Image (cartoon, rainbow, N blue to C red):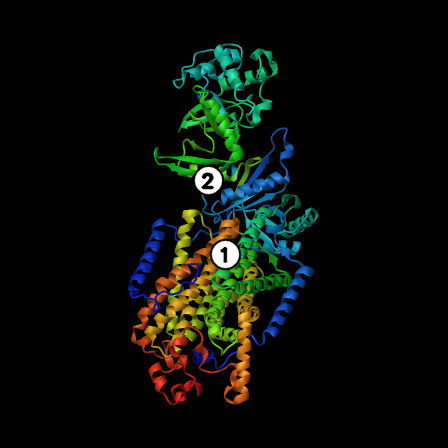
Amino acid sequence: MAAPKKGRRPAGGQSRPGRALALILIAMVALTGGMFWSGHTTPRLGIDLAGGTSITLKAKAEPGQESAVNETNMNTAVGIIERRVNGLGVSEAEVQTQGRENIIVNIPRGTNEKQAREQVGTTAQLYFRPVLAVAAAAPQPAPTASSSGSPSASPKPSSSASGATAGEKSATPTATASTQGRALTEALKAPSPTPTGSASSSTTPKATGTPQATPTPDAAQAALEQKFATLNCLDPKQRSVAGQGVKPAEPTVACGEDAPGIWSKYLLGPAAVDGKDVDDAKGALDPQRGMWIVNMEFTDAGSKKFQAITSKLASQTDPQNRFAIVLDGEVVSAPSVRTTLSASAEISGNFNQQSAQDLGNILSYGALPLTFETQSVDTVTAALGGDQLEAGLIAGAIGLGLVIVYLVAYYRGLSLVAILSLGVSALLTYVIMALLGPAIGFALNLPAVCGAIVAIGITADSFIVYFERIRDELREGRTLRPAVERAWPRARRTILVSDFVSFLAAAVLFLVTVGKVQGFAFTLGLTTLLDVVVVFLFTKPVMTMLAKTKFFGNGHPWSGLDPKRLGAKPPLRRARRATAPAAADPKEA
Amino acid sequence: MSKLGDLGARLHRGEVGYDFIGNRKIWYGLSILITITAIVALAVRGLNMGIEFQGGAVFTTPKSEVSVSQAQEYAEEASGHDAIVQQLGNGSLRIQVGGLDTSQSDQVRSELAKDLNVPEDKIAAELVGPSWGEQIANKAWTGLGVFMILVVIYLAIAFEWRMAVAALIALIHDLTITVGIYSLVGFEVTVGTVIGLLTILGYSLYDTVVVFDSLKEQTKDITKQTRFTYSELANRSINGTLVRSINTTVVALLPVAGLLFIGGGVLGAGMLNDISLSLFVGLAAGAYSSIFIATPLVADLKEREPAIKALKKRILAKRAGAAAKDESPDGTDESYADEGEIAVIGPRAGRHGRAPEHRG
């Protein structure tokens, strides 16, 4: 629809107006039916019109990093949260800072509040860590397991069915005790000392000598191993703190859910790749396995790091050939590596469509620089009093009434076409907006309502351009039927050229901007497209059909197409012969 | 209808018509005057940016008897800024007021405490950052920039670069005037008004393109004739689409006028009023500039083109010759209201170009 198309059949060639009308009628019925079937019969309103939920988040300063809660980080967090809750740009959520350490997130009524809350609060710190050991969720199946006092108290055999080696390791937590322990200690260091290695190398325990030679890191190691041994991933409380607040460069323990309700615990090496190395991520359905996964593309730096770690892991044996994908301290999945990988990776785990897409969304938009805790969740009323909306609607209705009066006064019978076209356009806009609420979270705010009111002008302009073209043709002395067909190609060109500009504005703003401007652009694009659809599939066919009726075809004075009233020239044949043109053109005289 | 329809017919035939191009200097002057006023107003008074852009203070009051709209009045009185009042689930009120610093916020808090009849320390006051942060604003500017470039390229391809330039000038003209009105009236600039401005951006260009489309059609075969200069044809084109322009403008403005005058009159100031004002001014300016600014500008630019220049020379020479030879018959050429001839140029030319006998 870009450039004006010339040289199409001049007569417009719409010989089957019934077909177009049937098409739009079916579309209207189907959409309206869909709307009632879905049960969402009103568009979702934005927070300014309907109120919604206000979530207050408080930045949690990590011990020793209090200075991290500063303006820069807060603003970054606002930007990231904004994109998370408003991924498609049409949900009209608002995000702002409050005070020094709070962020307020306002979500319009009708949004999936729980999901929004999860998305908002998730820090989304993603790390790829090499797996050093895996064990079943609880330290021991025996009830005594909970007494997690001394590290030496636990050399009981593990009865865990999953992974005998891992079980053994967990059962021998002291650093010095056994070969397994040594292997583990070795493994703890393994990922770090390679010269090409990741950012983690500096803070890991020294790589030389026996474990006993370096007492300080050993103590840390011992503590960690003890932690691993006693960790009970079946306990939600322990689970939630297991991998939290750990520096990426340090080894850690974490829990991961293998299948709903079935947990494993992991002992993990320092992070090799982190979320910042992810360039883009998307939830997708893996057609082969029929499960939801998240595909990631790494940045250049990320690819190198990922290559380094996978090439190292590929030569190890299970479980040390695995790397764990750790999101906010929890292992999402821990696939084993067989070959060296680089540019992209996929995360598979217990995803459904929603959670895969959410995670893709979150990873694409980056991790929050700070950890937040939800401080309060409040419902809020509309920022704009209900009276404002009501008065606005009444005023708009009066204005629309005046438009109809004007159209009737000016176009008489023809105004029927204009009013019906406006009606079709309004109905389609309404229904589509109502359907888009549940589909993509579209919410209508006051500016969008105003945009829709302006759209009345743009939509009406399309008919007006066409009507004036028809009248010009009549004035040239044509009868209505050829006039309707001849006027169409030129009116069509004007409509397409000018609507394209509007659509361009909408498309660019939608793609480039965020937040409310994006929402506005969406409304503009939608109404522009509908304008074209209505003119092509409704206004033009209706005109073609009406031209065949006596009332319009013969130019009844009330049809709005009376050649005499329009001051038309007499038909051409007579004009040629006419000796006294003045008589043929009484209005002019 | 009959009178307007008749006018339409006479405009169509070129019997009546306003000399938009000939009088362009008057309209340029008027527009420059308005634009300068707008710029001066902007420079002197600045814009009253809302809480979304500059942040402000948020007060959380305990549950009270005061209604939301009353609280809004109190807050606006106490602060002198627009206030957004929301009721929270537990019945307490959240009042957001833009443009306050810490000391002002304390002052507003104590006044609010008096108005709402609650102890001052029960009202929590905190400064809030802008929800329309720098990032969002930057993205919006980028979007606007990209759009402007693309639309100029598009217009340059679909029409020609002169029209693209003229459309852009008309657009800037419309936006400046609208922003100037904001500054003059002192309305608060909210996200809603920004979106109003963007709506105008779309409409202004849309309207200009419709007028240009007719101009392009009228002047398609300009070099193949020697009756009319470019400016004259441009003028005909404007007059030919004048009825459409009037109708469209009326239809576009009526609902907005309803919002502005009826809605605003009933409710007084409010967000609705802010948006409808920017829309009303912008739509009117958009319709005006397409006709009075954009098209004459194209004519001005076109008349500098060598081919068009030469054409004008030839036409003037021809007219002078004709006038010298025979004074009366072609005397009307100067006003080019040569009735019945409007259809000579353009697509209709082939069908009934010869109808010189058609005169009233």
Q: Nearer the viewer, residue B51 or A557?
A: A557
- Observer-nearest of B173 and A539: B173
Instruction: Residue A155: give x, y in percent of width and height.
Output: 47, 11
Left or right, residue A91 beside residue A78: left
What is the three-letter code of the residue carrying label 1?
Answer: Ala
Residue B184's disc is none
Q: Are marks 2 and 1 in contact (CB under 8 Å)?
A: no
Give the CA separation, mark 2 to mark 1. 32 Å
In what element is the residue under mark 1?
helix
Left/right placement of residue B260 relative to residue B127 reads left
Q: Amino acid at mark 2?
A: Gln
Residue A532 drawn at (x, y percent): 40, 61
Percent x, y of residue A39: 37, 50
Going from N to C along the chain, the mark reached first, 2 or 1, is: 2
Q: Are marks 2 and 1 on the same chain?
A: yes
- Which of the image's four quarters has the N terminus of chain B? bottom left
- The residue that appears at 44% across and 73% down in the rendered structure is B346
Chain bearing mark 2: A
Residue A505 got which mark?
1
| Of A35 and A285, the residue lying toward us | A285
Task: Check residue A115 in the rendering and tell me which mark sits there, or answer none.
Answer: 2
State which chain disc 1 sits on.
A
Q: Quadrant of the C terminus of chain B?
A: bottom left
- Answer yes or no: is residue A183 visible: yes
Vertically, is B90 above or below A399?
A: above
Above or below — where is B203 with respect to B345?
above
Which quadrant of the structure image shows residue B47?
A: bottom right
Mark 2 lies on a secondary structure that is helix
**Category of crowding for the residue at label 1, using alpha-carbon neighbours closer than 10 angstroms: few (below 14), some (14–19), many (at least 20):** many
